[in-house]
Amino acid sequence: MKKIAEGVAMLEINLNHFIIHPTLIWDEQKAVLVDAGMPGSLDLIHAEMEKAGVPFEKLDAVILTHQDMDHIGSVPEILAESGHSITVYAHGLDKPYIEGERLLIKADPEKIDPARWESMPEEMKQMYLNPPKAKVDKVIGDGEVLPFGGGIEVIFTPGHTPGHCCLYLKKSKTLIAADAMVADNGKLHGPRQQVTPDMGTAMASLKKLLDFDIESVICYHGGLCHENVNEQIRKLAE
């Protein structure tokens, strides 16, 4: 867990050496989790929230940036564990995938690289073909400001998936990039081509980020970047 700003922390979930970075946002009343890790991540999420000093019982909402398994996998566990109703947010274009009405894009033979699918362990294939499902309670859209943590602006950035979104935390000037970018030792890179079905659209989506004054970027894969991020994003978008 790494605190980014007041009421904002980047979590580190290490499940079988697969490391990802959900974001936790909170105030005195409630907490919001952005993305939920692979299936089986609940205990790790609990532990990271405890490190941040935020009790699990405070969790009021989960915002899903997109439909991928490593972002939605533990949502059913979180909902079952909670003693109260937790609101799930996601973009409408990814909603039917998250709710199980459509096959996840990364399991669709017309979308995924056949060689990558064949190389995938059988257990992982079955997970993608029979993924965890969760009801999306509220659909989010481009430019919408969610009423958490001083305002979270939704930035629709399709390409990695049809409904992929980034989130901009206005108060701390933090961008939650999800999979629109990856970080490597503090350097930003574009989305991973092998798991981005529409790379052209994904790269074009980065141009939307130029409208924001960003001081820190949390990448789901690679973690935090806070050095010259506006300039780094501008170079990627070109």
Image (tube, grey):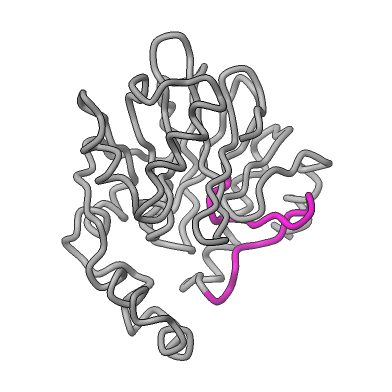
Inspect the magenta stretch and tell me whether residue 66 lies in it.
Answer: no
- What is the quadrant of residue 237 in the picture? bottom right
Q: Is residue 184 left or right of residue 35?
A: right
Residue 92: x and y in percent read 28, 48
Q: Quadrant of the N terminus?
A: top right
What residue is drawn where x is 22% and y is 68%? Answer: 130
Between 32 and 161, which is closer to the camera in this rendering? 32
Q: Quadrant of the C terminus?
A: bottom right
Left/right placement of residue 179 relative to residue 173 reads: left
Is residue 32 shown above or below 117?
above
Asked if residue 192 lies in the magenta stretch, the reply is yes
Q: Residue at x 55, y 52 (%)?
A: 14
Side of 224 where 109 appears, left or right: left
Tell me what residue is drawn at x 39 percent, y 60 percent.
Answer: 68
Residue under the image location 33 percent in, 21 percent down: 57
Task: Find residue 168 and report its image quarter.
Answer: top right
Residue 232 lies, in percent from the top left, at 78, 50
The residue lying toward the viewer, choosing from 20 and 45, is 45
Q: Which residues are magenta?
A: 177-194
